Amino acid sequence: MHRLTAAALTASLLLALTACSSYSAEDCQKALTDASTKTSRPTECQDLSQEDYDVLLTNWALQKALNGMSKEDRDLLDYSDDGSINGSISGD
């Protein structure tokens, strides 16, 4: 009986600690995936304000789009940005 009680206490404590833990913006950024949306956040993003989450989600989407572009398309976008191909637009 004591083993069951100890196991139940341990499980309760772990759940309480998990519920109290907070994640950083960096944790949120790492957790973003294709399933992340404005209203469907990863657990690591729950503590962020809507504004902060929106910024991270937008940045993630832009980086993903840039990484999916060919070098020629990136160079064209870079040239359109400031008139030269100088790496001002980067998907990395």
Image: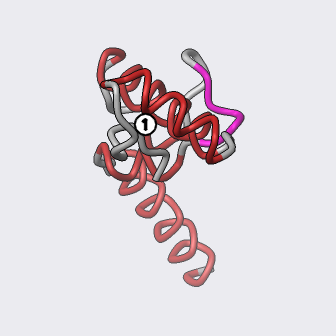
Magenta range is 33-37
Label 1: state its secondary structure. helix
Residue plotted at (62% across, 75% down): 4
Q: Find the residue positioned furthest to the bottom.
A: 3
> In the image, is 78 to the left or to the right of 26?
right
In this view, 5 is above or below 78: below
In this view, 5 is above or below 45: below
Q: Main secondary structure of the magenta part?
A: loop
Expressed as whole percent of the image width and height from the top left, the position of residue 58 reads 46, 24
Residue 89 or residue 25, whichever sits in front: 89
In this view, 22 is above or below 36: below
Q: Which quadrant of the figure has residue 35?
A: top right
The residue tagged 1 is: 45
Residue 62 or residue 77, whichever sits in front: 77
Expressed as whole percent of the image width and height from the top left, the position of residue 34 reads 70, 37
Residue plotted at (45% across, 63% down): 14
- The quarter of the image holding the N terminus is bottom right
Residue 37 or residue 45, whichever sits in front: 37
Expressed as whole percent of the image width and height from the top left, the position of residue 76 reads 54, 30
> In the image, is 75 to the left or to the right of 73?
left
Q: Which quadrant of the figure has residue 40?
A: top right
Give the colour scheme of this rendering.
secondary structure
Task: Assess whether residue 68 is covered by the magenta stretch.
Answer: no
> In the image, is 6 to the left or to the right of 54?
right
Residue 23 or residue 51, whichever sits in front: 51
Task: Assess whether residue 34 is covered by the magenta stretch.
Answer: yes
Q: Which quadrant of the figure has residue 81?
A: top left
